[in-house]
Image: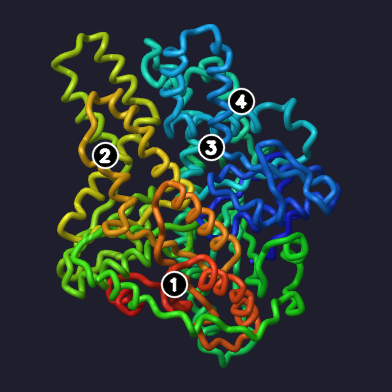
Amino acid sequence: MELFHPTKLTETRHLFFTGKGGVGKTSAACATAVALAEVGKKVLIVSTDPASNLEDVFGEKLSNEPRQIKGVTNLFASNLDPEQAAKDYREKVIGPYRGKLPKVAIDNMEEQLSGACTVEIAAFDEFTNLLSNRSLTDKFDHIIFDTAPTGHTLRLLQLPTAWSSFLEDNTNGASCLGPLSGLADKRELYANTVKALANSSETTLILVSRPEYSALNEAERASLELRELGIKNQTLIINGVFHAEGDDDFVANRLVARQAKALNEMSDYLKKLQLFELPLVPFNLTGLVSLKNFFEPVNMTDAVKTEAVTAPKIPPLYTMVDHFAQKNSGVIMTMGKGGVGKTTIAAAIAVGLAERGHKVHLTTTDPAAHLGLVLKDTDLVANLSVSRIDPKQVVENYRNEVLSKVSATLDEESLEFIKEDLRSPCTEEIAVFQAFAKIVDQAKDSFVVIDTAPTGHTLLLLDAAESYHKEVTRSSGDMPEAVTKLLPRLRDPEITNVLLVTLPEATPVLEASRLQDDLKRAGIKPEWWVINQSFQATNTKDPILQGRAQAEEQWISKVDKELSNHCVILPWQADDTIGIDSLKKLL
């Protein structure tokens, strides 16, 4: 494969970087932005990820407004913060009525605009403004979008069509009028958004993947679904391709073999895309110096030098499972940045508890459903059951449940209002939330292990807990007991254990740290951290891998000494963890 450099891309105005969480799309997007700015292009890089890492990479505080990055002429950056966007959106809708309508009416509007639907709609509103409003963006040669993890990105990109379709069909102006009230006059903006995305001379989609089976699989899924939306100008960057210095290091040889196998088995579909590679580098990709060196030949003088080694002093994963096994029931949730191994850790804990004689249910709320890839049709151990919260299925169930309750008591016109409400994209959030609450409710006489979605999605889900009470009540007329009890259960340390999973790298640790702070503010206190895939916990002597092991020290030490009450570590695994037997090897 040809080495990637931004100057080799088709020169389009919009560059979208997307891919599975943890593949390095923020690093690739930021380094591309720096490189284009340094050749004289005026560049704006925007994060649409609810858990943006742009601030970590550039080391500067960012907001919704573009801000020039120090040290790089022509480079501007902004974070599309969904929570701030929702706040601004609420004020834009409600502001004109303050002092004109009675307080009770204003309170009612604020209630309707307090849910997760509004956050999603507000983020979408900002996104379409950026993409379609030429007066806002004409001063830039390139706008680079560092998108959210794939599932969220697909949802975001599908929204222009989804919302346009909803507004087109919404003849009665029913329901969702709170969150949607500011959108009715924006059909032309949505049409421009869809047009810009599908125009190959305006937009390039850059899929970023690791040379790994699951990341390539997700890149292909994203590529196909976005192609269906008309986004056909696509490029694939394989990030982190490792070239060993010699042939006598076991870890290095296994890493080379694993990557080669994944690349050889890459589908013909992906092989036909414009393909580039980026090498595995021996340093963290934060700060301008690292970003500027990213597209240069690997130079070991850039590597971190330290004699400290903390990994051998941290206990292994099974000690945490032994701790949980002292109880007979509870909720265990794995959280963290996308791509850090939450699914694998959740599955390993579930297998470990089941093998210790406990009844365990393992489930996922991740729209990308990586659990099926980890278990890979293998026979489950005794006491272990598995499920997935399938958004399409739970939405269908939710619609049927609501309609069955109200059909007999409403007239035809009122029933049409309810049906229109249930066709809105907001319904999916409510339905998934209720399914999540029901799963947590099962942890009365058994363990429920939940593999959560990537951080941003998870935060939206948890943030929604209280505000959804009103939204669900409005739609279905009552509140399930499981929903009412959800937050108290999540806040009770005797019932719920939240584990923060991270790689020993800058952005996953910093993102998990922010998540921990947010959870504490919500009354949920994570007790355990899991440091996954550590090269420092192996015996590698390869110079590049040793460079990465030394770069890990800062972050392993930070987790161990500053961030966690209890911490366990897993070494980098020589083989893909697929199937029950390979999960047992982690224990």
C-alpha distance separating marks 2 and 3: 23 Å
Q: Mark 3 — residue? A: 83
Do labels 2 and 1 touch, CB within 8 Å? no
Q: Which of marks 1 and 4 is nearer the N terminus?
A: 4
Q: Earlier in the sequence, mark 1 or mark 3?
A: 3
Q: Earlier in the sequence, mark 2 or mark 3?
A: 3
Front of the two marks 1 and 4: 1
Q: How crowded is mark 1: few (under 14 residues within 10 Å), some or many (20 or more)?
A: many
Q: Name the amino acid, label 3.
A: Glu
The disc label shown at residue 483, or none: 2
Is there any visible trace of residue 374 in the rendered image? yes
Q: Which of marks 4 and 2 is nearer the N terminus?
A: 4
SS at mark 2?
helix
On the image, which quarter does residue 462 sit in? top left
Q: In this view, does 444 lie to the left or right of 305?
A: left
Q: In this view, does 541 lie to the left or right of 109?
A: right
The disc label shown at residue 192, or none: 4
Colouring of the image: rainbow
Of residues 586 and 246, the one drawn nearer to the viewer in this rendering: 586
C-alpha distance separating marks 3 and 4: 25 Å
Do labels 1 and 3 touch, CB within 8 Å? no
The disc label shown at residue 254, or none: none
Of residues 466 and 138, the one drawn nearer to the viewer in this rendering: 466
Q: Can you say whether 322 is above or below 57 in the image?
A: below
SS at mark 3?
helix
Q: Residues within 10 Å of mark 3 (few under 14, many from 20)?
A: some
Front of the two marks 4 and 2: 2
The disc label shown at residue 567, or none: 1
Q: Is residue 60 left or right of residue 205?
A: right
Q: Residue at image x 64%, y 61%? A: 276
Q: How crowded is mark 2: few (under 14 residues within 10 Å), some or many (20 or more)?
A: many
